[in-house]
Image (spheres, rainbow, N blue to C red):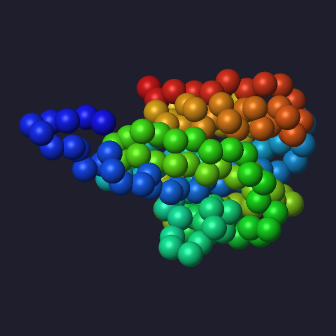
């Protein structure tokens, strides 16, 4: 607990913001492709690459939120029943954020619509994880890398990137 002038900072008593991320993927081994999106101008970390995602709404499960965000940001519809829990990462912030990361399988790499992003690309795991990303994504990308290796989706272990 941090005390400043006798007052506890407000963000230390609030529950972390719940955010769900969709790591959309197709294929296996050398054919595996992941969908990465670029943050729009005017937003924090503009121009950096990330997985589609956003806040979990009241009464919504993180898996449903991940698939909803994939649709809202890239125009790609996915079945939340197929979402695979990859892991969680808590970023202390401020604000504190609990990231819920899901692998979202698709039959083929659909053409993304740039709705909530300025660019979206289907990339190999190595290409996607090497892109410049927001600081919290370094740990998230480690979760994705471990999941890809355990699921035998990637042909080789990719390297997580860091914001540049």
Residue at the outermost left position: 5
Q: Position of residue 75 (x, y in %)?
A: 62, 68
The residue drawn where x is 83% and y is 32% is 149
30 lies left or right of 91: right
Q: Is residue 150 visible?
A: yes
Q: Position of residue 44 (x, y in %)?
A: 35, 47
Residue at the outermost bottom position: 59
71 lies left or right of 91: right
Res 131 quadrant in image? top right
Q: Is residue 122 visible?
A: no
105 lies left or right of 75: right
Q: Position of residue 26 (x, y in %)?
A: 82, 51
Quarter holding the C terminus is: top left
The residue drawn where x is 68% and y is 44% is 87
* Position of 112 relative to 47 (above/below): below
Q: How many marks?
A: 0
Frontmost residue, 97 versus 110: 97
The residue drawn where x is 44% and y is 52% is 16
Q: Position of residue 117 (x, y in %)?
A: 50, 56
Quarter holding the N terminus is: top left
Frontmost residue, 93 versus 8: 8
Frontmost residue, 68 versus 42: 68
The residue drawn where x is 65% and y is 55% is 22
């Amino acid at each position: 607990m941090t005390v400043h002038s006798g007052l506890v900072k407000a963000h230390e008593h609030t529950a972390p913001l719940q955010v769900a991320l969709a790591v959309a993927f197709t294929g296996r081994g050398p054919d595996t492709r992941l969908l990465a999106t670029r943050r729009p101008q005017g937003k924090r970390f503009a121009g950096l690459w990330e997985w589609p995602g956003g806040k979990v709404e009241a009464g919504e499960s993180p898996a449903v939120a991940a698939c909803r965000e994939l649709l809202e940001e890239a125009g790609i519809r996915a079945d939340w029943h197929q979402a695979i829990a990859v892991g969680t990462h808590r970023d202390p912030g401020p604000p504190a954020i609990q990231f819920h990361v899901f692998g979202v399988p698709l039959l083929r790499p659909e053409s993304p619509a740039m709705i909530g992003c300025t660019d979206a690309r289907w990339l190999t795991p190595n290409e996607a994880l090497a892109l410049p990303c927001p600081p919290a994504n370094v740990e998230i990308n480690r979760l994705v890398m471990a999941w890809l290796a355990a699921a035998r989706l990637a042909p080789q272990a990719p390297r997580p990137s860091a914001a540049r």
